[in-house]
Image: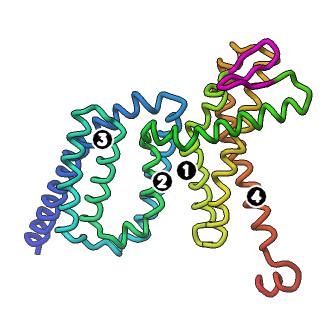
């Protein structure tokens, strides 16, 4: 019996070592190099500065969700999984050779999802859909996509901020890409640069909504629809703050530490607004009086 146990243990250990060596080798070869570049080139900027937060919280959420559904794990269709990898891996290599980091990490992440499908199957991936989608926001989107999504919003926010402050009596106006307040000039792109992280801000807000309301589909959908408007409102407040700092303290002050602080304030304001709305809705939906007593009883 001792011999049988030792053989079983050795066999399990050998299988464990082989599978983990393959995973570690794949991570070192295909995941680590582009992610180092993402950390160096994107996560050190204002646009991608929240990438590490998304990565850490996303991995934690993925681990938590997987632990709840791991019993559903069944290897996926090999033909479909390996066909996807056969397409994605050459594209990953081509993107790396051409130096297009955004496409390289996109193909890398898609290949990771395809590999996960081969290991655990479609049922587990469907159950973990949100952390899989959420983790994608840790990767840098193409600049063209960001420009297309944010440029109209930048123009609308800057125009609304100028009109709002003008109505309050401030000496402010705008011309093209410039905002003129008193003797100072402020570029619209600089004032609205926080919108570059609009996708990340929306993702972090959705993370909170998912954690709080994933079992309440109606509330989850309702709160999810509010994420983008709240993120835009928070950026509007950020633009107002930067313009007022420029007016009262000068352009150098507005573009220094307080510029980064305004970005942090944007995130705090968006999350606080989302939490406040969620608390009000939850309180209003809570049963009261005799109904609540019968429910509690």
Q: Is residue 178 magenta?
A: yes
Residue holding disc 1: 203
Name the element at disc 2: helix
State the residue at coordinates (66%, 69%). Answer: 219
- Could you tell me how far apart the alpha carbons at marks 2 and 1 are, in whole angstroms? 6 Å
Which mark is first along the chain, 4 or 1? 1
Q: Quadrant of residue 263?
A: top right
Label 1 crowd (10 A; few <14 / some 14-19 / many >=20):
many
Side of 17 relative to 241 (left or right): left
- Could you tell me how far apart the alpha carbons at marks 3 and 1 are, in whole angstroms? 21 Å
Name the element at disc 4: helix
Task: Give residue 255's position: percent from left, percent from top.
Answer: 66, 19
Q: Are marks 2 and 1 in contact (CB under 8 Å)?
A: yes
Count of marks placed on residues: 4
Name the element at disc 3: helix
The relative height of residue 186 versus residue 270 in the rendered view (above or below) is above
Which mark is first along the chain, 1 or 3? 3
State the residue at coordinates (23%, 46%). Answer: 91
Q: Nearer the viewer, mark 2 or mark 3?
A: 3
Side of 86 relative to 160 (left or right): left
Q: Main secondary structure of the magenta part?
A: strand
Task: Give residue 22's position: percent from left, percent from top.
Answer: 17, 51
- Could you tell me how far apart the alpha carbons at marks 4 and 2 are, in whole angstroms? 22 Å
Question: Magenta segment range?
Answer: 173-186
Residue holding disc 3: 104
Residue holding disc 2: 134
Q: Are marks 4 and 3 in contact (CB under 8 Å)?
A: no
Residue holding disc 4: 277
Q: Quadrant of residue 281?
A: bottom right
Q: Residue furthest right?
A: 169
Which mark is first along the chain, 3 or 2? 3
Side of 237 relative to 195 (left or right): right
């Amino acid at each position: 019996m001792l011999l049988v146990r030792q053989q079983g243990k050795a066999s399990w250990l050998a299988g464990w070592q082989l599978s983990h060596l393959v995973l570690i080798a794949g991570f070192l070869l295909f995941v680590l190099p582009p992610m180092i570049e993402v950390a160096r080139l994107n996560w050190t900027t204002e646009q991608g500065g929240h990438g590490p937060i998304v990565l850490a919280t996303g991995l934690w959420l993925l681990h938590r969700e997987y632990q709840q559904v791991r019993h559903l794990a069944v290897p996926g269709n090999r033909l479909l999984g390996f066909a996807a990898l056969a397409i994605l891996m050459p594209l990953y290599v081509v993107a790396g050779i051409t130096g297009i980091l955004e496409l390289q990490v996109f193909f890398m992440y898609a290949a990771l999802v395809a590999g996960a499908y081969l290991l655990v199957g479609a049922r587990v991936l469907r159950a973990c859909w949100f952390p899989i989608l959420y983790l994608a926001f840790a990767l840098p989107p193409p600049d063209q996509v960001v420009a297309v999504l944010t440029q109209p919003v930048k123009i609308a926010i800057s125009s609304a901020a100028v009109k709002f402050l003008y109505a309050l009596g401030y000496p402010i106006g705008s011309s093209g890409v410039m905002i003129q307040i008193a003797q100072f000039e402020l570029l619209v792109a600089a004032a609205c640069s926080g919108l570059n992280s609009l996708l990340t801000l929306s993702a972090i807000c959705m993370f909170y909504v998912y954690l709080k309301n994933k079992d309440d589909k109606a509330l989850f959908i309702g709160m999810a629809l509010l994420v983008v408007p709240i993120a835009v409102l928070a950026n509007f407040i950020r633009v107002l703050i930067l313009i007022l700092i420029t007016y009262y303290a000068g352009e150098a002050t507005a573009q220094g530490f307080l510029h980064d602080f305004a970005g942090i304030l944007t995130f705090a304001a968006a999350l606080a607004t989302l939490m406040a709305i969620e608390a009000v809705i939850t309180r209003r939906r809570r049963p009261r009086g005799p109904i609540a007593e019968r429910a509690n009883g």
